[in-house]
Amino acid sequence: MDKKTKVLIAEDDKFLSKLLEKKLGMEGYSVMIAYDGKESLEMCKKDPPDIILLDLIMPNMNGFEFLDAIKKDSKLKSIPVIIFSNLGQDDDVKKGLAAGAKDYVIKANISINDIVAKIEKYL
């Protein structure tokens, strides 16, 4: 794996973000963290990541709004997005995948090692 592969973690839970950052850093990824949707979008425009791990419930711009915004941007629309959320209803999953996410994982049902495997799958 290229050590310069950039992962954007768009997650407002600071503890979880730091945990993911540590694990992904140990796996050789370069990690960027944004704690809200607007910050996530600004970071993507300034320094596009190779893949995005996206929470849906975030302040200032939710995950669905963020996903819609990047899919409308010709420079960002090809970046793979994995939704990583507590929203686990079938409708939420369908909405996320229909909006352009490559995958949808429910936080309570996945380990950090599984998240790393998902990221590797879509790079």
Image (cartoon, rainbow, N blue to C red):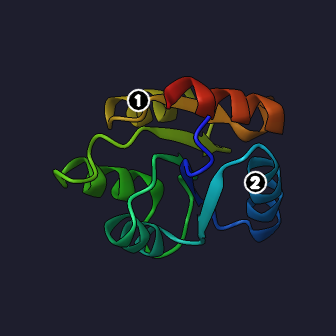
Mark 1: secondary structure: helix
Confirm whether residue 59 shows in the render.
yes
Judging depth in this view, the residue of 73 and 67 nearest the camera is: 73
Q: Nearer the viewer, mark 2 or mark 1?
A: 2
Quickly name the residue at label 2: 25
Residue at 82 percent of width and 57 percent of height: 22
Tag 2 and tag 1, C-beta contact below 8 Å:
no
Task: Give whichever of 34, 88 is nearer the camera.
Answer: 34
Q: What separation in Å lies between label 2 and label 1 (alpha carbons)?
A: 27 Å
Q: Name the residue type under label 2.
A: Gly
Q: Residue 107: x, y in percent?
A: 74, 40
Indicate the quadrant containing the N terminus: top left, top right, bottom left or bottom right.
top right
Mark 2 or 1, nearer chain start: 2
> Which residue is denoted by mark 1 in the rendering?
97
Sort mark 2 into few (<14), some (14-19) or many (20+) by Cα contacts within 10 Å: some
Res. 60 image quadrant? bottom left
